[in-house]
Image: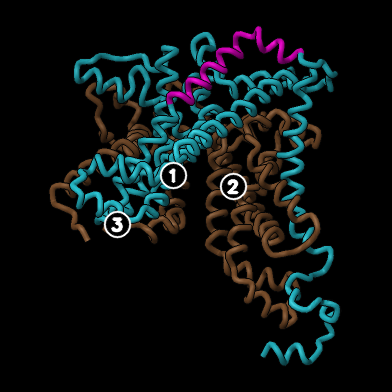
Chain colours: A brown, B cyan
């Protein structure tokens, strides 16, 4: 094994820190702006990175300006619904595609593959008219429905189920377990990792989505956080402290979620990797 | 254990007529479809049906509240004379040209930087992924603030004597800034894809090249790049399709009307603007969407074909 030379190691850390400043720095600057009081000059040159008198005043003001906590609650509802429907729906469909035999299985698989390839940006207008026809425009249900069982997630679950050895289920079948019992007691517990990945991405996707809720929601009382932020930015663009506080509210839960669950994100990546 | 269960001949209605050796493959006739039904229903109603109706609507003059009639190619003929359409097509195409090379190369370099397991590396990997996790709205607003006439970047530029630059008021600088934001947000995502690919590059190749006296840059060109070539094609395909469909970055930085005189409008912004609202021209917006479909499919095929030719 080649050993890392000292000079190379120093160079690596210098580069890592530079990229760190570039990727995380903007978030910290936003946080800093949100904590600066009304009397502090946020436009000073050279800029001052630390607030002189840190205050949460801007967070109170943003809540007075837009119902930011209601928006956060709307986002939470949408994201939670998305997690539940995606986990349940993709696990069921993935199991049907991977482990059950019936006429039309290939056609069903093909339908999911096609759905995955359709660019969402191109069909939003038709999705919007479909929602109108269903009378679900301007509702949170309308926000949730189009992505509530992602084709990509179904195919992920299908691959996970395909990798399970058949013998396990065969034994259960011989013992008299029916298809639901085999699914719930044997197959599903074996693919928990993939379910977790689906859950995380479903939550993030719903929490972060912008274009679709922008099109579906017109009534400001039903806004999700991303749409509310855009509204805040458009209406009160002259006070950066407020916008900054709003963005921190929107991003903090996700960063916390990500920090807590990050090992799932990088699952598999480190395992086969070259050990330095 | 299992054999005793079978010999007891449980009162299982399915058991007797199961063909030998195909036991697992039998189940209640209705259940497979019950499993697949929710998923099929959702994608049919909200992905496949809208896709087909987009294709159909493109040939009608449908509006939000008016069903519309078949108008043949009228929408597409109108597109040819619509300045806004050409602006959108130009900007979305420029976006691909500007963003894709950066997103194919920079995340690979980043992956090489975080690949080696040195102390604290998991922290750096996660930190570099943060922009991917954050909502595009948050990212857009952070950069609007950073690039503001009086924002951080201009304060720094002024402090070092360069002077302030109107990143968000000039049509071209605005588009360039939006591209930079797209690249910034995408780095971590493609870094992970490259990390997975790099993990499969045989270490012996690098060692052999090192023994032959190849330096780091030479090893990168002769060992790493060929080994991750198909991943580069994948990243190229994914990022070019995403770049062509850009909406949020430009919408947030340029505003709903697309910057000065609408010159920064992208195709998807145009779809959103023309197709929504009570007076939305659904038919016309669908015609633009069809152009988006055709170009994205073409881009994907182009990139993947270039990869195959590279390997031959």
Q: Is residue B58 magenta?
A: no
The answer to whether residue A231 is seen in the rendering is no
Q: Is residue A182 above or below residue B257?
A: below
**Which chain letter goes with mark 2?**
A
| 3D distance between C-alphas at marks 2 and 1 | 15 Å
Left or right: A256 with respect to B269? Answer: left
Q: Earlier in the sequence, mark 2 or mark 1?
A: 2
Q: Picture coordinates of residue A256 (x, y %)?
A: 43, 50
Report the residue marked by disc 2.
A79
Q: Is residue B90 magenta?
A: yes
Q: Quadrant for residue B32, please give it.
A: bottom right
Q: Which residues are magenta?
A: B74-98
Q: Picture coordinates of residue B54 (x, y %)?
A: 74, 28
Report the residue marked by disc 3.
B204
For this rendering, which residue is in front, B308 or B164? B308
Q: Element under label 3?
A: helix
Quadrant of image for the N terminus of chain A: bottom left
Q: Residue A252: which disc?
A: 1
Prevailing secondary structure of the magenta residues = helix
Q: Is residue B51 above or below residue B189?
A: above
């Amino acid at each position: 094994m080649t050993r890392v030379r000292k000079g190379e190691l120093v160079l690596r850390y210098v580069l890592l820190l530079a990229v760190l400043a570039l990727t995380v720095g903007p978030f910290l600057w936003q946080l800093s702006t949100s904590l600066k009081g009304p009397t502090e000059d946020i436009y000073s040159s050279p800029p001052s990175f630390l607030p002189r008198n840190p205050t949460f005043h801007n967070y109170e003001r943003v809540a007075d300006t837009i119902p930011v906590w209601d928006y956060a609650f709307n986002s939470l509802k949408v994201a939670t619904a998305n997690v539940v429907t995606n986990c349940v729906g993709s696990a069921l469909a993935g199991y049907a595609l991977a482990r059950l035999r019936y006429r039309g299985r290939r056609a069903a698989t093909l339908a999911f593959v096609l759905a995955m390839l359709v660019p969402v940006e191109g069909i939003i207008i038709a999705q919007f008219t479909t929602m109108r026809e269903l009378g679900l425009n301007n509702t949170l249900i309308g926000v949730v429905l189009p992505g509530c069982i992602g084709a990509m997630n179904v195919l992920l679950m299908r691959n996970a189920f395909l990798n399970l050895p058949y013998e396990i289920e065969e034994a259960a079948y011989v013992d008299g377990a029916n298809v639901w019992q085999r699914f719930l007691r044997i197959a599903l517990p074996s693919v928990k990792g993939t379910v977790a990945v689906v859950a995380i991405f479903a939550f993030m996707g719903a929490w972060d989505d912008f274009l679709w809720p922008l099109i579906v929601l017109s009534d400001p009382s039903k806004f999700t956080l991303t749409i509310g932020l855009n509204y805040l930015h458009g209406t009160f663009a002259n006070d950066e402290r407020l916008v900054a506080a709003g963005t921190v509210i929107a991003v903090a839960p996700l960063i916390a979620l990500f920090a807590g669950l990050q090992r799932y994100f990088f699952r598999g990546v480190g395992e086969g990797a070259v050990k330095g | 254990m299992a054999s005793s269960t079978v010999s007891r001949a449980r009162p299982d209605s399915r058991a007797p007529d199961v063909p030998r050796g195909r036991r697992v493959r039998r189940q209640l006739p209705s259940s497979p479809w019950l499993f697949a039904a929710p998923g099929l229903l959702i994608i049919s109603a909200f992905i496949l049906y809208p896709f087909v109706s987009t294709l159909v609507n493109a040939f009608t003059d449908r509006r939000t509240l008016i069903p519309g009639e078949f108008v043949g190619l009228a929408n597409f003929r109108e597109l040819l004379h619509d300045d806004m359409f050409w602006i959108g097509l130009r900007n979305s195409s420029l976006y691909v040209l500007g963003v894709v090379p950066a997103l194919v190369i920079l995340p690979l370099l980043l992956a090489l930087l975080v690949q080696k397991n040195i102390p604290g590396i998991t922290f750096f990997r996660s930190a570099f992924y943060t922009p991917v996790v954050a909502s595009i709205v948050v990212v857009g607003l952070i950069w609007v603030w950073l690039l503001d006439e009086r924002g951080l970047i201009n304060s720094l530029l002024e402090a070092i004597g360069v002077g302030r630059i109107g990143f968000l008021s000039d049509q071209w600088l605005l588009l360039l800034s939006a591209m930079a934001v797209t690249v910034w947000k995408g780095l971590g995502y493609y870094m992970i894809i490259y990390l997975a690919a790099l993990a499969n590059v045989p270490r012996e190749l690098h060692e052999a090249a090192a023994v032959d006296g190849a330096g780091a840059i030479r090893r990168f060109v002769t060992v790493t790049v060929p080994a991750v070539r198909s991943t580069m094609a994948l990243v190229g395909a994914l990022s070019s399709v995403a770049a062509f469909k850009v909406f949020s970055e430009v919408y947030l930085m340029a505003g709903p009307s697309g910057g000065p005189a609408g010159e920064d409008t992208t195709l998807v912004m145009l779809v959103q603007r023309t197709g929504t609202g009570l007076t939305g021209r659904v038919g016309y917006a669908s015609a633009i969407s069809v152009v988006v479909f055709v170009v994205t499919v073409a881009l994907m095929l182009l990139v993947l074909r270039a990869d195959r030719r590279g390997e031959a």
